[in-house]
Image: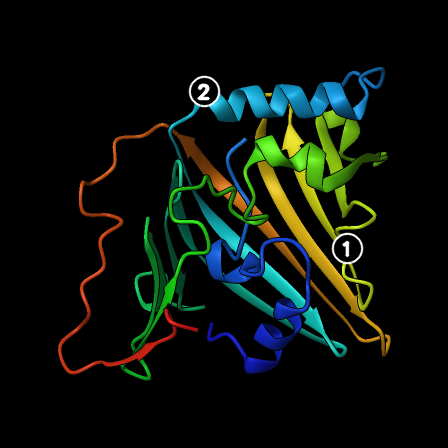
Amino acid sequence: MIRQNNWRTVLRKSVGFQKFLLAVPLLSLLFVSSAYSQNVDEIFQNFKQAYDKSDNFSANFEETTLFANTKSVARGRIVFRKPNLLRREYVGKKDAAKVIQVTVFDGEYGWTYTPMLDQVNKMKLDNPKGQLFPGIGASLDDFEAMYDMALVPDEFANPKGIHNIELTPKKGLANPAVKEKFQIWVKSDGWLPVQVGHEIELEDGSRQSAIVKFSEIKRDKKLAPDLFKFVVPEDAEVIDLSEN
């Protein structure tokens, strides 16, 4: 799935990680409980502890976006390794072996290659030495300082041990021209994220939202040493955005 220019424009106005779909499709991604008595702080700490103990995360994903009453669905694979290495591949709707677009974060730069266009976009990572949480972009250590957190009740998901943590930018950190929220659905069995979401609303009332659902989730698997290295294909056009 090829990212549209209007989506990039909207994201530049948002507060959190401006690359929700570019980095994970998003994420989000490494690591509430069926006990209803737990509060959001306890659930978040369990989630964070599991994340801190993990090295990497991989999964298949299904990404659903809604914009101007238009719905689009894309599928693919994502692999993330702490602190800031990522590989995300969008695949064909009928042929999962066909890669439509690939994004690689190598720790310093982000590379997005679209074979159909024979084009590569290169960008500088905002904080190459910092820790990335796919789908949000900030380190989990910064979440409590940057966002207000709340549990969203769900009569269907809660009995399965899945809880929805909603994150909204704290007052003073929010862009007044944009209403924004993130959501992370995590499961108490392993405290893994099973779904992430992002929604924004502009001053004119227009909205865009994205939901990324994960399946076949694996944690701390052995990864190929060159998985997060990107080699520009021969004859591909490179658009260097790293100086912008």
Image: 146 above or below 6 = above
Whether pointer 1 and pointer 2 mark residues with C-beta atoms closer than 8 Å, the reply is: no
Inspect this view and state whether residue 33 appears.
no
Which element type, helix, strand or loop, lies under badge 1?
A: loop
Q: Quick one: quadrant of the C terminus?
A: bottom left
Which element type, helix, strand or loop, lies under badge 2?
A: helix
Crowd around label 1: few <14 · some 14–19 · many ≥20 (10 Å)? some
The three-letter amino acid code for the residue at tag 2 is Lys
On the rendered structure, is 109 left or right of 46? left
Q: Residue at x 24, y 48 (%)?
A: 227
* Horizontal and vertical percent position of residue 133: 52, 42
Nearer to us in this view, 148 or 165:
148
Crowd around label 2: few <14 · some 14–19 · many ≥20 (10 Å)? few
* Horizontal and vertical percent position of residue 134: 51, 46
On the rendered structure, is 68 left or right of 54? right
* Horizontal and vertical percent position of residue 102: 35, 64
Nearer to us in this view, 37 or 127:
127
Q: Residue at x 40, y 37 (%)?
A: 83
Q: Residue at x 75, y 23 (%)?
A: 41
Q: Which mark lies nearer to you, 1 or 2?
A: 1
Q: Residue at x 58, y 25 (%)?
A: 48
The three-letter amino acid code for the residue at tag 1 is Ala
Image: 166 above or below 55 = below
On the rendered structure, is 223 left or right of 23? left
Image: 38 above or below 107 = above
* Horizontal and vertical percent position of residue 68: 75, 79
Residue that badge 2 annotates: 53
Residue that badge 1 annotates: 174
How many discs mark residues in the rendered view?
Answer: 2
Q: Earlier in the sequence, mark 1 or mark 2?
A: 2
